[in-house]
Every structure is written in structure tokens, then in C-alpha cells.
Image: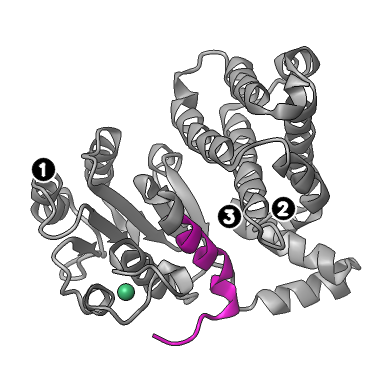
Amino acid sequence: MSPIPPHFRIAEKIARVGRSRGLFNHSILIHGPTGAGQREVALRFGQSVFCETGDGPFGACGECRNCRRVPQGLHPDFIWIEPSREKGLPNISIDTLREQLQDRLVLQPFEGDKVVGCVYEAEMMKPEAAGAMLKYMEEPPPHAVFIFVTENRERILPTIRSRCLPVPILSPAEETIEAGLVEGKGLSRAEARQAGLWAANEGLLPEAALSEGVAQVREESVRLLDLAVREGEYAFIPQVKALKYDWETTARFVRHWRDLLRDCLLLAEGRAEPQTHLSETKTLKRWATAFSTEDLAELIDRGFEYEEGILGYANRPNCLATFLSEVSARSRASRG
Ligand SMILES: [Zn+2]
């Protein structure tokens, strides 16, 4: 495969870190604008799961037998599902999912310890197919990894979306967008780059990522997490209980915390800059000293669980408060 284009950089990092930290125990949602290279990124993730060495970009060498078989469609444990275009509108039916995936989820992998089901253009799943998919995801066999690929994240069932680690592919025209923000909005280069990363991460246009409401939630999430890291429950609980947010915003808090903790983990592991929250580098570096890397990895996992469980909380502030309490309990700083 060709060299890594710059707009794959976030996806590349996630695959590489994921390979070494067992993130492939989660489902993955690869999303990006039309023509950005979703297919290539999905295949590279597939290679990352199966590569014999794990060395190289995306955590795959690109040369071993497994790496060669994945893009050729010849790896028996890599199931590629895409919309049928035979009649009517392209769609993925429940029958297709059953035929191609169901048996493979029940049976053991042919070769290694994973079976990857990759659903390309996942927004084309018919409602019954999406419902069946959700069932598979609710009680996945330990060897199953699901990868969804879409150019329209909003059209993926929210209950599927919330179970996935988002893997953004930036727009290939990102440089143009950044230049537009510099000239049109008078932002500095660094600010424009940050806006582009936030936008990609949250599946928004850069203008929307900078809008007051979205920015406010992002800033609140940093402030509350900082209270949890530095202080203790007495500091953040009254503030969290006072929040009056809808389900979507509550989920956004959890996602931000998970992403901030992931950035923190990257810094703790010696990377020079965070993946998404560049403007918080100083704070993230300070947090990185407050946790062991094991605790950070564990908290990121817990973030996924909270995001999944969030619908089950009748009381949304309680959900946020208990997540922060876990953060606080693991922080050396708050333990004094
Ligand atoms: Zn390989």
C-alpha cells in the first residue's frame, strides 16, 4: 500500500496504539468525508488485527502473509460486508448479515484468535439488519471485532454508534479548511488546526465545533475532569448534580472524558502531542503524572462502559458523577 497520507494520521495512531493496548476488544466506527479513503483505512485496521509482527504504520507490516491476504479478501477470519447494488437502492439486508456473519460469530476463528466483521457503508444497513447487528454487539463472542465504516455517522443507529470507538478520517482538504479558518475567522494556524481536529472527532463542521454550545460542553468537560483529578468528590459532585443536560450532551461529556484520558495516555507513553485536544496539552501533561498507564487504560475502558450504559441511567448527573468518582479514586493527586 502507498505511504500514509496526512489525513489518516489520527486513524493511524489509534490502530497502532490499539494494537498494542488491546483496544480491538471494542467495536470501531471509521468515519470521514466522501472520498477520504475509508476503504483503505478499514483494510489497514484489518491488517493491524491480523499482522504477524505489528510493526509499521497502523500497527501492521503490510508484507506478511496475513497483511497480504486481508486486502485481497483472502483472509478467512476477515469478513467484509458491503451493500448489494443488484436491485433498487443499495442496502445491507438482515439476510446478508446472517449469511455472512452469524455463523462466523458462533464458530471459532479458523486461524488466530479473532474474527473481524467489517461493515462497509454501514449507514446502508436496513433497520432490521441494524437491529440484528446491535444484538450481536450486545453479547459478542470474545473473538469478535466489529468495524463499521461510514461517510455519514449521523445515519448510524445511536445505540450502535455509542458502542464504538470513533476513528475519524480527516478531510483530505483539511489544509484548505484550516487556511479558510485562518483567513475567514482570523484564527492562528494552531487554533485552526485544533478546530479541524475537534470537528473531525465530533463529526461536525469546523464552524459547528467552534460554536458556543459545543465549545461550552468541551470546556466544562475539561474543567470537571480537572476537579476530579486534583480535588475530590466534594469539589465536583455539587457541580455535576447541578447540570441540566439532555442525553446527547451527557454522552458528549463521557466521550470527551474518554478522549481526554486517551490523549493523556498517549502523552504518558511518551508521545509528543495529544491526538485531539492539542490546546489542553499542558493540562493533559499534568494529568498524565497523576495516573499509572494501567489506570488510564482502565479508565478509558470504563468510559466505553459508561457510554454504553448511559441510557440505563434514569439520572444522568449520577452517571457523570460516578464516572468522575472513579477517575478521582485512581488519581494520585486527589488521594493527596
Ligand atoms: Zn503484517
User: How far apart are the two marked residues, 3 and 2, measured between alpha carbons?
Assistant: 15 Å
Q: Nearer the viewer, residue 228 or 92?
A: 228
- For badge 1, the amino acid type reads Val
- Answer whether residue 38 is magenta in the image: no
11 relative to 217 in the view: left or right? left
Q: In terms of secondary structure, what is the magenta stretch mainly? A: helix
Residue 90 image label: none
Q: What secondary structure is marked by label 2? A: loop
What range is drawn magenta here? 1-18
Residue 106 image label: 1
Q: Nearer the viewer, residue 102 or 20?
A: 20
Q: Residue 152: give x, y in percent of width and height.
A: 46, 58
Residue 277 image label: 2
Confirm if mark 2 falls within 8 A of ligand 1: no
Protein image colouring: one colour
Residue at position x 75%, y 23% in the image: 334
Residue 203 image label: 3
267 relative to 129 in the view: left or right? right
Q: Earlier in the sequence, mark 2 or mark 1?
A: 1
User: How far apart are the two marked residues, 2 and 1, measured between alpha carbons?
Assistant: 40 Å
Q: Earlier in the sequence, mark 3 or mark 1?
A: 1
Q: What secondary structure is marked by label 1? A: helix
User: How far apart are the two marked residues, 3 and 1, measured between alpha carbons?
Assistant: 33 Å
